[in-house]
Image (cartoon, helix red, strand yellow):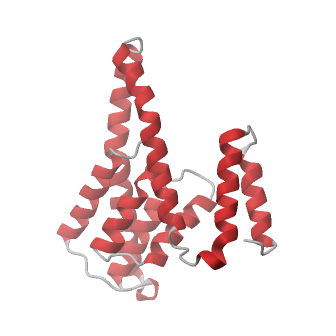
Amino acid sequence: MSITMTPSDWMALFNHFASLSLLGVGGAITTAPDMHRYLVHEQHWLSEPQFGSSIALAQAAPGPNVLFVALMGWNLGLNAGGGLAAGPAAWTLALLGVAIALAGIMLPSSILTYSATRWAHRNRELRAVRAFKTGMAPIVVALLVATGWLLSAVHDQPARDWPLWLLTAATTLIVWRARLHLLWLIGAGALLGALGLV
């Protein structure tokens, strides 16, 4: 995939990710649906496989889940540079994409979090602070559900993918009702995948 990026496009990417940064309550992954809308559908800067593989690779890798933003920036830069085979110029644009995407998603929320945490700690007994903390929980859950729905909507063949939906429903129930550590469920999903059952 080859695209053309002007300086104003790079600035628009930074501004969009900076605005999403302030919405990313519960982590950057909760902003994935809007990133998908903007990068894939609206701007056509990334393809569906690039978007999905950026999230999948970052979630499989150890480290913070914000890595998927860096991978999106990398893919966007490579697309702007003509692909991986285009050489050092494409790699430079890929690194620029990483820097712009990460700066956009991390700077505003980091500054806000630092400032708000200091203020909230000093005023932790205020009723408004306690109410705000309580009110944020359903927002985080809704954003995570939207992200999960977006990632699972790629599977549009229910007759073939029913084991995935069944596994998702079972995992959701187990997480909701039991105190089983999540790593056991991830391991069970990996085993079922390795056996070819899902």
Please indicate whether residue 164 sits to the left or right of residue 22 in the image.
right
Q: Residue at x 63, y 55 (%)?
A: 62
Q: Is residue 60 visible?
A: yes
Q: Residue at x 36, y 13 (%)?
A: 126
Using the image, determine if residue 196 lies above or below residue 138. Answer: below
Furthest-left residue in this view: 8
Quarter-wise, where is residue 134 in the image?
top left
Q: Residue at x 44, y 49 (%)?
A: 143
Q: Nearer the viewer, residue 106 or 187?
A: 187
Q: Quadrant of the C terminus?
A: bottom right
Furthest-bottom residue in this view: 85
Please indicate whether residue 185 sits to the left or right of residue 54 in the image.
right
Q: Nearer the viewer, residue 159 or 196?
A: 159
Using the image, determine if residue 81 lies above or below residue 191. Answer: below
- The picture places residue 67, in percent across and down from the top left corner, at 50, 58
Quarter-wise, where is residue 46 in the image?
bottom left
Q: Is residue 27 visible?
A: no
Q: Quadrant of the N terminus?
A: bottom left
